[in-house]
Amino acid sequence: MPRNPQLNENGELQHLLSIEGLPREILLQILDTAESFAGVTEREVKKVPLLRGKSVFNLFFEPSTRTRTTFEIAAKRLSADVINLNIAISSATKGESLLDTVANLSAMQADIFVVRHASSGAPFLIARHVKPHEHVVNAGDGRHAHPTQGLLDLFTIRHYKKDFTKLTVAIVGDVLHSRVARSLIHGLTTLGAPEVRVIGPQTLMPAGVEALGVKVFHDMKAGLKDADVVVMLRLQNERMRGALLPSAQEFFKHYGLTLDKLAVARRDAIVMHPGPMNRGVEIDSNVADGPHSVILPQVTFGIAVRMAVMSIVAGN
Amino acid sequence: MKLQIKNGRVVDPASGKDSVGDVYVADGKIAEAFSKADKTIDAKGLVVSPGFIDLSARLREPGFEYKATLESEMNAAVAGGVTSLACPPDTDPPLDEPGLVDMLRRRAKSLERARVYPIGALTVKLEGSALTEMGQLADAGCVAFSQANAPLPDTQVLWRALQYAATFGFSTWLRVEDAWLAKSGVAHDGEVATRLGLPGIPPFAETIALGTLLELVRATRARVHVCRLSSAGAVEMMRAAKKEGLPVTCDVGIHHVHLCDMDLGYFDSNCRLDPPLRSQRDRDALVQGLVGGVIDCVCSDHTPVDDDGKHLPFAEAEAGATGLELLLPLTLKWGAASNLNLAATLARITSQPARILGTASGKLTVGAPADIAIFDPQAPLRISAETLKSQGKNTPFFGHELQGRVRTTIVAGNVVYEG
């Protein structure tokens, strides 16, 4: 196996491509830095000059509102210039190749590329071809990874639960297609969470998922029992009918999070969701808007976490 | 011209011979000893072997000249000691008309390098619905019929194709992969694909298709060569099918003997192959299958891909690896790791594929075509874009140091390569 492509020769974070393979120290460095930025976002003047004069290119080959916006806010709070490019069609049909696009933007003096792409591994390809002073931050690639989402999930869990080493975390729903689940699982296992569970039907579980260090449950209540953290995954519209699932209603019956099902988790359990939510498909409104839900704080923390990631890679 | 190859270690897998001596060539054939040669080659310290026979090498003509040309790939072939190669029909247009086959053979012949054996398309445009004119294609020089990597999901068509081929004694060379199960998959459905978030192709995509094919062979008695096994399950099924006496043979691609899904690393698109690299367990079963003879031979499955086709995210990258120049060193590496002697090792790229191809080459007996590879089995070979003659610079073995360098390649008694 070649050297982890996201670390430089000093073992520091050059790019953020995946949580997998990142040492615990780097994860904690990001979370601690994010903690310090969380204060900035509450100040009257919400800016720090860390990325002044730097250019951040938001390069989105797949549509996104929340992630792109929070990256933009994060970059602006670091005083960077932000350029948004929505190239919401695949690089293969667009004529210009992915690497040509990146080379052109690089000629415009980019410092950080924030990349979302429908193909797993696309940010790795870009990272292999950028100049040494340029940094790539993965904002979601195919089913593979969504490391800043994973980090903001970790930040949220640490905020409410303090210590990872005593936690039972249940991740529910479409694990097969979920980059959010993969990134969070790697983060939790690296930070020492003793029990990470995935819950869903066999059709939505990837082959050999146990090898990631999780326990698989098909029965929701069994999987939620005594959980400290419940993470609901988004179910994409196109998966709701067909060979993976018969219908959204049937999915909700078995795996939708309701107050009744949540009752078997710990009384102080928190409920998370990466958004956007499908109310009545994976989560009931009573839960989404209820006292266990930390879904909106997740969004707020996302800004601080993305500020931390961009300031750290730009400094290395 | 009379040629004498002196003092080499002569290895002839067909007869099991492995001894130091001379090989004589006259009129393009292996000859009895004679005293007065027009030319002599000193092969002291080198191995003299039948030229290698590769059952799958894509030359990319017609249609894909931007990926490779007949000239570049024929140079690669002889640089790799390959003197006969079968080329799959997945050109553009596919080899489904006698005129195309005829043209390819003429072009290849005019280059005076390796012998080229076209494999005809089994169905028109490889679309899997209408049969090609197999009789006329055979007359034009097709040695077998195949779908290359194109699916043939309609089992009615597959059945009829095998019946028709069996009627006239044509051989069909088929990949086995259930098109539905393989749909949109790009990697072995296992832990690595799960970790990398790549859509998977389960191993039973192969065994289900093989089960169907074997059942149809049982019904039609068509002669079938199963191409590019990738799973342990398929090796076991082939073992049973041969024991039962079905008229089947099979091969494996050289990359699948050495690599597994772990080698994908961080999305190395050079490891994007068709069939996909599977688990270590599957790889070990392929190695053992080749050692024990369930798998008859190994091929390069040479597929030159241009940079534009590989500099893409893994799932979008074109499948395939360059292989003609790696066939010998990688086969030697497999043989050494499996404790096989040189004759047994080389059998998998000489006498065994010759049998499947139905050619008189692949042996050094008197009267056989003088297709010969002379190589240094210990000489180091560093794999790099600069050293590869093939226009396809796509290989997972970049930067690797392998052993086994071809010094001289002879086809029909003529020296076609010296390195």
Image: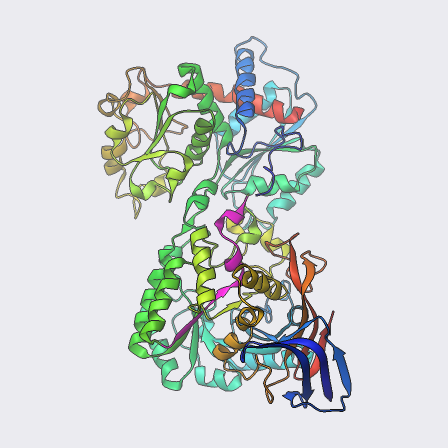
Q: Is residue B258 magenta?
A: yes
Q: Does residue A141 appear in this view?
A: yes
Work out whether A272 lies above or below B307.
above
Viewer-closest of B10 and B226: B10
Work out whether A242 lies above or below B234.
above
B369 on left or right of B168:
right
Picture quarter with the C terminus of chain B: bottom right
Work out whether B402 lies above or below A8.
below
Tell me the residue at 49%/76% (across/down): B120
Work out whether A72 lies above or below A61.
above
Can you tell which quarter of the image residue B8 is in? bottom right
Percent from the top left, x then y, of residue A113?
A: 61, 33
Farthest top residue in view: A44
Percent from the top left, x then y, of residue B24?
A: 68, 86
A144 on left or right of B53:
left
Can you tell which quarter of the image residue B38 is in? bottom right
Tell me the residue at 40%/61% (across/down): B177
A24 on left or right of A12:
left
Q: How many marks?
A: 0
Picture quarter with the N terminus of chain B: bottom right
Q: Is residue A130 magenta?
A: no
Percent from the top left, x then y, of residue B142?
A: 51, 80
Percent from the top left, x then y, of residue B195?
A: 45, 40
Q: Which residues are magenta?
A: B247-265
